[in-house]
Image (tube, rainbow, N blue to C red):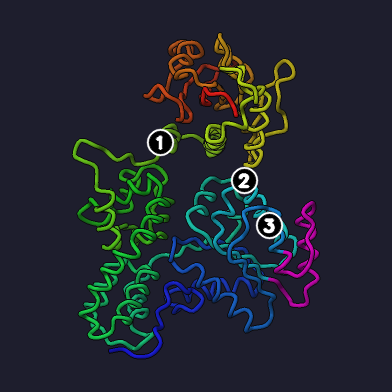
Amino acid sequence: MLDGKNPYRPGEPKEAPFVGREKILDDLLDALRSGRRALAAVMGGRGMGKTSLAHQLKRRLEVEGESLVRLIARPDSDPRGFLAQLEHALGLPLDPLLPVESLIEAIEAIEQPRAVLVIDEVDNFLRPGFGRDLLENLRAAYEQLGGKLGIVILGGSSLRELLTSQSSPFLRTARWTPLYGLTLGESATLIREPLHLSLPDSMVETLWEQTGGHPYLLQFLMERVVTLGGDLASRISEAMSAVEAELATPLFDIWWDNLTPRGQAAYRKLASLSGPLERREWARALGNGPDALVEILATTGVARADGGRVVPRGTLFHEWMMRNYPSPGAGETVPPEDDLTARLAALQVHPFERSVVEGIADCARTIVEFPTFHLRTDPVPGNGGLVPEDHFQIMLLTALRQRHLAEPEALSGGPWRSDIKVRWRADTTRRACVEVKIWNHTGYKEVVEQALKYSVRGDEFACVVMVDRQQGPLGPRYREVCLQDGKLGDILWQHDGASGGVYPAFITRHQAHWGGEVRVHHFLVQLPPGAAT
């Protein structure tokens, strides 16, 4: 029987044993002390130790006494709310109209040699477009303060998604620090040292295999083993049952959802192999961009990449997945990537094109998910019941400007003027045009020609957004009228179903008037037919 306070604290990261992150902690501390590369992003899945690391950073720097350290445990997803959190942390007012300038002024006013902001759980903060803008404000202040300010943000897979989208100078500048599952030796330390237990190596290895070295899972198991008391060896299986009964659904469900369909398919693929997946085989087995995918799997805690070889980890998670999401049958296939990612990767599009297409797709989903805002208040049926075309142009312009893609040219107002121009900030010679229309009786059969007319030499793509108050599936009619059943250009991809909700619905290739080829992405946004209320 084990007596005394239980030292394993899976639900209290501030008090939990700190194991396996010492090198990462020292590297971050060295950077923050020196002011060089003192901008950092730490990525890890749920329970991987981000919050524990954040508290250790704060504790160590406060003991040294050279820094004003402020931990924002969960940044507000509203920009004014986040600025209020910063104001409270620094004890000085910030101007929402001049956030960078007022933040610099506040930091320069502190007595300590430097200030350090540690911002934990940033995923919800990053989802709205302004979250990225606020990160850029922090980066600008960091660069202008020349070592007076250090910033560490901690989050999950949204950080990797933002980094790979190439739309965040903050993450391209920051020190990138992924958190992986603990090694066997680190797991042994976490299991044994808090209570100086003498578990045999074979038992430690079993726990490591069951959990994949995931810190939260290991602590949860050991907390139960200690609470149950008696002979440790006889209690481990009972603790495993507690994981299955109490932890699997809330924790593993979150992991599974965060992996996204592509990550889920990749995990299934790894689990189906008889041995490790060698580095040279990653792209063939996992699809384009395998490095980012492997990193997400590893920081979630369900895979380990070692020396270029990646293997699935965690028996508990694998057994849960097989019970709740059994593998497809023999006649079914699991796509290696999610639908939109697969389409764009197969076309080998530039990151600029991918960012524009993904931005329009997100906007289209928002319009469909919240349709009332886009319908007139009178009960006019059909497209007569929609707000004007300008409304959709402005909404799309706003969405693209949040990604720092669109120029301020919106609303059709004259000849040779596209509805929206998009241009890549990193290379302004890369640009494209976007045409937005509401479906009418002719279907705007010239809309594709119009998009092509506005393209200039060097343009690789254009986009068409067609809005319809759904009286029937728009896809077949759009193909017949606007694409002339494929006669207008080559159809590279099309949605097999007749209904809307897949973005883009068509991808076509056309000969441009200046001699090159232009891809056109066609988004069919179908609102419900009922009257607005």
Query: Split into 4 quadrants, where in the image is the N terminus?
Result: bottom left
Mark 2 neighbour class, 10 Å CA radius: few under 14, some 14 to 19, many 20 or more: some
Query: Under tag 3, what secondary structure?
Result: helix
Question: N-terminal of the two: label 2 or label 3?
Answer: 3
Report x, y in % for residue 231.
22, 85
Question: Is 32 in the magenta?
Answer: no
On the picture, is 506 further left or further right than 273? right
Residue identifier under label 1: 339
Amino acid type indicated by mark 3: Gly
Residue contact at pointers 2 and 3, CB within 8 angstroms: no
Report x, y in % for residue 315.
26, 62
Is 367 drawn above or below residue 98 in the view shown? above
Question: Is 106 in the magenta?
Answer: yes
Query: Under tag 2, what secondary structure?
Result: helix
Residues in magenta, as a range: 87-115
Residue identifier under label 2: 129
Residue identifier under label 3: 81
Query: In whole angstroms, how far apart are the C-alphas of marks 1 and 2?
Result: 23 Å
The residue lying at 76 percent from left, 56 percent from top is: 99
Amino acid type indicated by mark 2: Gly
Mark 3 neighbour class, 10 Å CA radius: few under 14, some 14 to 19, many 20 or more: few
Query: In whole angstroms, how far apart are the C-alphas of marks 1 and 3?
Result: 35 Å
Q: Is residue 525 visible?
A: no
